[in-house]
Amino acid sequence: MLPYTAYLRVYQPITAFSGRDRAYWRAYAESPDRPRRVHAVAAEHEESLRRLVATPPIVAPERESGHAYIRRVGSQLYVCPWQTRLRSWLGFQEFRSRTPARLSTAFVPESTAAATDEAFQRWRERGEPLRTQILTTTWTVPLSWFALFDAQERCLVLQSGTNPATTRGDNGGTTYGLPSGDAAGGANPPDAASQRTLLYVTELKRARDRLDRAIRVLRESLGEGALLTSAERMEDWLTGTAHPSSLLELDYGGLVRLLGDDALREDESAAEVAAAITGLEQGQDELTMAMYTRVTQRWKAVQALEHAN
């Protein structure tokens, strides 16, 4: 059972990496044994479960993961490293900040927590990066994520045999779907269940243009508030993480198991967020409220399943 988690990934062009890392990732991309995208989430999940059921639990691996998500567009190679160790450290920091101390020790012994904190502190003191190329969210997708994408950049795969490289429509001359090799199988050929996927893919420049517009419209129309703060945090993350030639991918991940085929076909969240922003910009209050209500109600219904029996 995969977690009910969605992912926002930054794929850096291979040229953005150092010479040593560039050689490693080129060889990795050619390896027939690397997990393909449709199995990578499951592989990540299995790896984390093995660490958490250990005695004592292993909060973060001793070394950074050598795995990554891979995309090819023409002759260009794009890489999104898993960064399992860093993501584990950051996730543990968030867990401890939200959990009373007397409860957190029931999950992670204090000695293990202290050792984890010391390892992370040494990482920070060396000036290592603290931003990850993958954001995650459980039981929902934030509206600020949808603001980065256009409805025509959606790729929906419901069953085996569906062409996973086909998007909703024109994407300015470049078609993004599942990374090449996933459809054909390669290592770990996917079954029908694992192929069931909904994702969006776009170029960073397009995403930044849309986000900049959203921030401007929100600031001028609504002023300070949760929506503007969320959009500004997204802007800060992209500025500190993404190479100018990067690709962005929004992957519904395990959330597709909460939604039927009809619900996935009818999911127009990116289009609804874009329409709500247009309504704000043009002073069309009815359009804005209709689109905002539609998209928020959809995701509130999904999020409510967290507490379902």
Image (cartoon, rainbow, N blue to C red):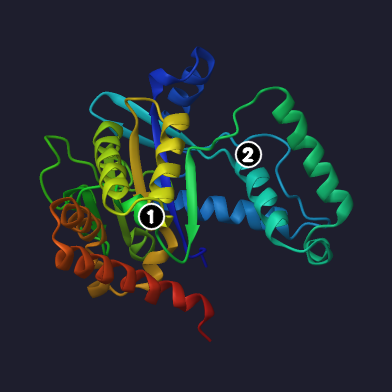
Residue picked out by circle 1: 227
Residue ranking furthest to the top: 19
Work out whether 50 lies above or below 213. below
What is the CA distance from the residue labelled 2 to the residue labelled 1? 28 Å
Kindly check if marks 2 and 1 are in contact, taking CB atoms under 8 A apart as contact.
Answer: no
Q: Secondary structure at mark 2?
A: helix
Name the image quarter holding residue 246.
top left
- Residue 254: image location, x then y, percent: 44, 63
Snapshot quadrant of residue 193: bottom left
In this rendering, the answer to whether 184 lies above or below 71 is: below
Visible in this render: residue 179? yes
Identify the residue at horizontal 37%, vertical 44% (top origin). Answer: 186
Q: Which sits earlier in the primary sequence, circle 2 or circle 1?
A: 2
Residue 249 x, y percent position in the rendering: 35, 44
306, above or below 85, in the image: below
Residue position marked by numbered label 2 in the rendering: 86
Q: Residues within 10 Å of mark 2 (few under 14, many from 20)?
A: many
Residue under the point 52% across and 68% down: 1
Q: Is residue 273 left or right of residue 79?
A: left
* Residue drawn at the location 72% of the way across and 62% of the way down: 99
Give the number of the disc on residue 134.
none
